[in-house]
Image: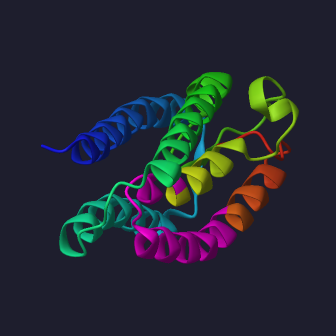
Amino acid sequence: MTPYTLLILLVALERGAELVVARRNAAWSRARGGVEHGAGHYPAMVALHTALLAGCLLETALLRRPFVPALGWPALAAVLAAQALRWWCVTSLGPRWNTRVIVVPGLPLVRGGPYRWLRHPNYLAVVLEGIALPLVHADWITATVFTVLNARLLAVRLRCENTALAGAGAVGAAG
């Protein structure tokens, strides 16, 4: 197993951990009257994020992408920064964090952690990771395709999330 394959596997395991936390948090939110919004785009989001990981492995293997230290090391640092930001978001939102848009009516706006400065810091982590992870091994096609498709998906996701939060009186309080 190459170091890059191991990195992709570790990111996949991290995503699995996210899903465990998200399921637990979804149950918490639903028990408090939480309502899910935008469930229709969720399968596309899962497929795109799965394709990112597969694309990294496939592009490296099929096109024999090399590890270019001047690109790979800074990209790896960006991947690690994205992970740190993501988990800062998870801990800042606590049981309100989710991979889905589930809003519990009446909860106050989260203003701690990275939410002090950014409205949707988790999506910054997603964008950063989507660019940097493929570039660890010079997978520029995967980085480009993911970034373009993710931009379209994030436009839908942000509109959905902002509408749901505004309806609950808590704009900016979710993931």
Question: Is residue 34 shown above or below 70?
Answer: above
Determine the residue positioned at 77% across, 57% down: 162
Q: Which residues are magenta?
A: 132-157
Residue 89 percent location from the top left of the image:
64, 32
Determine the image quadrant of residue 57.
bottom left
Residue 66 falls left or right of residue 62: right
Dominant SS in magenta: helix
Residue drawn at 79 percent across, 30 percent down? 110
Q: Residue at x 23, y 47 (%)?
A: 5
Please state which of residues 63 and 7 is positioned toward the viewer in this rendering. 63
Examine the structure image and report whether residue 154 is included in the region drawn in magenta: yes
Residue 27: percent from left, percent from top: 45, 33
Relative to residue 172, is residue 96 depicted above or below?
A: above
Whether residue 109 is visible here, answered yes or no, is no
Residue 57 visible in rendering: yes
- Position of 79 with respect to 88 (left or right) is left
| Looking at the image, residue 46 lies above or below residue 121 | below
Where residue 65 sits in the image (x, y, percent)?
30, 66
